[in-house]
Image (cartoon, helix red, strand yellow):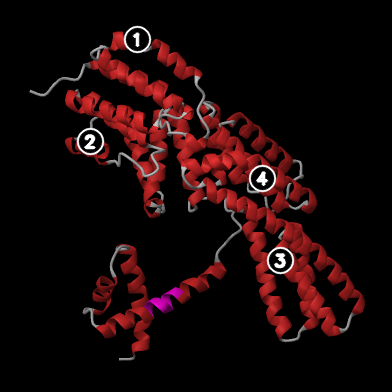
Amino acid sequence: MDLNSRQPNKENLFVKTLAKTPDATQLQVVKALYGKATTANVRALQKLQSRVRSKLLNQLYFLDHSDSRHLVSRRYELECLDMLHKVSILYAEREYNLSERLLQRCLALAEKGEFTQYAVLCARMLRNLHAEKRDAIPYKKAVKVLAHVQQVLALEDEAEQLYTATQLALSGTVAARRAVLAVLPDRIAQLEALHRKARSFTTYNVVYRARLAYEELQGNFQEMIRVTAAASRRLKEGKLNERRFDLRFNHFVSIYAYLRSRQPVQGLRLAEEYTRDFHPSSNNWFYFQEHHVLLALHAEQYERAQQLMEVITKNPAYLIQREAALQRWDLYRAYIDFVLPPPRPSVARQRQMAQWVLQLPEYSRDKRGHNVAILVLQLLHFLRERNLEAVLMRLERLRKYQQRHLYEPTTVRSRLFLRLLQVIVEKNFDATKAAERGKVLLQQLHDTAPPGEAFAEVEIIPYEHLWELVLTLLREGAPMASE
């Protein structure tokens, strides 16, 4: 039999095998396709992989980038790249007249979209083309254009390098982020100076994002709301390049700022409106929906949070997220199931919910983020179970965690809440006495604004609401020692 006639079937079978078992090893795939894991069959699989990979890469040319829910600049950038690719082939074939017309069109597209790097390529090719044709006047014009766009590109490169170095530091430890906070004003001033020289979208964008990062680190979320609203207004007025400005990023930062500034109702309303601008196939959709869920939880709209979780987990791309993201979703879902349990949960479902609590990782390496939320969820679970030993154990872990990791001034809210939790032991799990004793601490908690993002423990449900939940659980019955 002609082996070539079987190749398409093998390729289809290979794709189906990976779709069904994405974690399969190479030897497992070889056995599924060829029956035996011989050296010859392993080599055959490698050649098959290469053919399939090439075919998949060729399909990239046919992707549709016109959907407005994707990054708006993508379609215009790819239009420039497509035209440059065609011009390169025509120029190599010495089709100068057609090359010149396409280059002029490409240069106009690059300038309209403020894609300076492509404007440089176009201007350079036009300069060389006119030199080949001995056209002196067009040559001088191309040289002048090239000099200008190269100068702008140099300024953009300097601004981007400064900004990316800052972003890299911001993705590090708390200490590194705090160090960046001290130098950010000077860096923003440098970026503003570069923008005044370049006057391009790229330099504007790095200034805009650096300002947002600075306000976020300081916990100045009201200013973030103002900055994002001003950017949206400028876009509507035609003062920002509509081919480049990422409105989705602006939406995301806006609802994040509403969440952190304790305005969840307003933020949730905007999130419901903005969600249409995010494509469900993109990672940005999941980032946006994460804050959408948190806004619903902070607004005490638990049924809405539950509905959102159902939509999110049904997304085909849900399971291919990073492990850290999946763990966060599990934590959010565990909180939602705790505050809004199914009407008649089965024994298996109750056991699964208990396992979620017990199996969640209790500490992350840099000791920030969701640690308090995880321990508090475990505490709530055992309060509902009225398991005294487990409750006391979690309270002790929270006390030790506070001593070791919550000593900075920026952790006041977490410290106040953990002190409230210790009150329930002092008052022997009496809800009325604990509520009375905790009034002062609760008021202090109300009066303490959330810290900047660099230093914050995430409050999946606000501490004030969690305290009410704790008191409700105590009213249903105090935990008891096991017999």
State how far apart marks 1 and 2 are (Cα): 31 Å
Residue drawn at (32%, 36%) of the image: 334
State how far apart marks 2 and 4 are (Cα): 48 Å
Tell me whether circle 3 and circle 2 mark residues in contact (CB < 8 Å). Answer: no
**Residue 249 falls in image quadrant:** top right
Check disc 4 and give the amino acid type. Answer: Arg
What residue span does the magenta drawing correspond to?
A: 48-53
- Disc 3 crowd rating (10 Å Cα; few below 14, some 14-19, many 20+) is many
Secondary structure at badge 4 equals helix
Tell me whether circle 4 and circle 3 mark residues in contact (CB < 8 Å). Answer: no
Q: Quickly name the residue at label 4.
A: 187
Check disc 1 and give the amino acid type. Answer: Arg
- Disc 4 crowd rating (10 Å Cα; few below 14, some 14-19, many 20+) is some
Whichever of labels 2 and 4 marks the residue nearer the N terminus, that label is 4
* Identity of the residue furthest to the right in this view: 137
On residue 118, the disc is 3
Secondary structure at badge 3 equals helix
Frontmost residue, 389 versus 293: 389
Frontmost residue, 476 versus 214: 214
- Disc 2 crowd rating (10 Å Cα; few below 14, some 14-19, many 20+) is some
Whichever of labels 1 and 4 marks the residue nearer the N terminus, that label is 4
Residue drawn at (87%, 75%) of the image: 139
Question: Percent from the top left, x then y, of residue 76?
Answer: 67, 60
Check disc 2 and give the amino acid type. Answer: Ala
Check disc 3 and give the amino acid type. Answer: Tyr
